[in-house]
Amino acid sequence: MKATGRRIDTGEVVTIEVDRFLIDEPLQHDGLKLDPDRRQFWINGQPVRLTETQFRLIAVLMAKVGQCVTYEELCPAILGYPATGSARKTLSVHIYNLRKKKIPGIVNLRDRGYALNPQAQPADRKE
């Protein structure tokens, strides 16, 4: 999947490979900011280091902020294989690691997938 982004400073269009989710400009939601060209992510202006998988995962969630992104959408887009039990568990580990980095608003929608609600507080609980 191709996701297209635009550089904040120059407006140049860049592309991220993230399955069917299209991002045509840098994403910003309630203190969260993602620059697909630089592969950078910030929370309230503070940079947060992410792995490539974590970056793709938060990019997809930010592209559909407030909406459920199903396991069937996330697993192929992020992991490259279908949403089996082991793929869901792998995804939950990546979500857990994002939560450890204090990224607010990642919500598990039981047996469906995940959503990003930036209004929510950081979650410190294990999946």
Image (cartoon, helix red, strand yellow):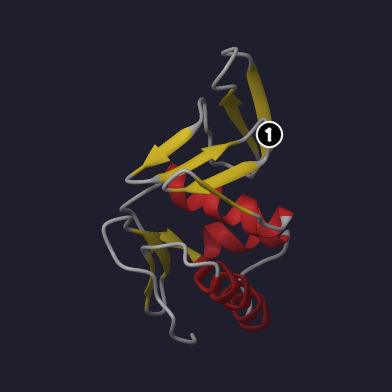
x, y percent for residue 13: 62, 18
x, y percent for residue 38: 68, 34
x, y percent for residue 90: 66, 77
Comparing 70 with 127, the one in front is 127
Is 41 on the left or on the right of 30, as rendered? right
| Amino acid type indicated by mark 1 | Arg
Q: Is 87 placed above or below 17 here?
A: below
Q: Quadrant of residue 17?
A: top right
Q: Quadrant of residue 68?
A: bottom left
Image quadrant containing the N terminus: top right
x, y percent for residue 99: 50, 71
Comparing 31 with 20, the one in front is 31
Residue displayed at 62% across by 35% down: 36
Q: Quadrant of residue 123?
A: bottom left
- Count of residue discs: 1
Numbered disc 1: secondary structure: loop
Residue on which the image places disc 1? 38
Residue displayed at 49% across by 85% down: 127
Mark 1 crowdedness (10 Å alpha carbons): few <14, some 14-19, many ≥20: few
Comparing 47 with 35, the one in front is 47
Is 49 on the left or on the right of 28, as rendered? right
Which residue in the rendered view is the most extreme toward the bottom? Answer: 126
Which residue in the rendered view is the most extreme toward the front? Answer: 46
Q: Is 101 placed above or below 78 here?
A: below
Q: Is 117 placed above or below 126 here?
A: above
Residue displayed at 37% across by 79% down: 110
